[in-house]
Image (cartoon, rainbow, N blue to C red):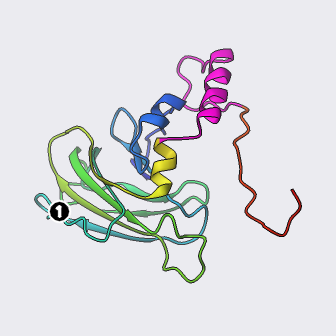
Amino acid sequence: MLLDTDAEAPFEGIDERRAGSGLVSVNAEGTYASVKTGTPHGDLDVTFDIQPTQAQADFDGWDEVVEVSLYFSGDGPLAGDPISDDYVNVPLHGEDDDHQWWRFRIHARGRDTVHDPSAPPEQHLVQVWPAPRAPEIRHKLTDQTGHRRRNPDPDYYARVKAAEAVAPPSEGATYASKPVTPLVADLEEDQPR
């Protein structure tokens, strides 16, 4: 997550999840971004590259690259895992109390190979520079983790839509949970089916 100290996570209905980039989602205020990883828990290799002007684009060797606008002070966002409450501060170029728009170009590789112990850890590069607010740009979308997020199982989608129709989220809710059972493949060949 990348967030301002008092930012709230965006509520995402199933339609937003299906329409998303599969790598990053941002709340309406631009103060909270959730980067989707392939690693369910454990360490990631994350590098922040803060530049005074637009960072040079090089997508070679990256599986997914998405660019978004976020609104932070020069103090920068907190970056980390909300479950473990383990955050670091990412200082940006600017004044501590002066909020402005920044472009975040988020790169990912290795999201599909995280279950292979011989593979290198999942890697992310986050390039940041000051820039006016602009629409999301999806430069590169090639990994299976992102593909599954952009194109979920249609049966799962239908079940979630049915659950949302029965109990829509209340007005002003920041998070809603629906009891939906996802389809899970049994990958253990030795177990009886």
Q: At 27% across and 41% down in the image, what residue appears?
A: 136
Q: At 69% across and 42% down in the image, what residue appears?
A: 182
In terms of depth relative to the viewer, which is nearer, 44 or 31? 44
Q: Position of residue 105 (x, y in %)?
A: 27, 56
From the image, tell me which residue sits under label 1.
Answer: 57
User: Seen in the image, is 129 located left or right of residue 89?
Assistant: left
Does dot 1 land on a helix, a strand or a loop?
loop
Q: At 12% across and 61% down in the image, what residue appears?
A: 52
* For residue 96, above or below residue 28: below
Q: At 20% across and 66% down in the image, what residue appears?
A: 58
Which quadrant: the C terminus?
bottom right
Image: magenta residue range: 151-178
In terms of depth relative to the viewer, which is nearer, 158 or 87? 158
Q: Position of residue 183 (x, y in %)?
A: 70, 44
Q: Is residue 171 magenta?
A: yes
In terms of depth relative to the viewer, which is nearer, 114 or 44? 114
Q: Is residue 165 magenta?
A: yes
Residue 98 visible to an observer of this rendering? no
In terms of depth relative to the viewer, which is nearer, 115 or 172? 115
Q: What is the quadrant of residue 100 in the picture?
A: top left
User: Seen in the image, is 73 located left or right of residue 84?
Assistant: left
Three-letter amino acid code of the residue under disc 1: Ala
Q: Position of residue 56 (x, y in %)?
A: 14, 64
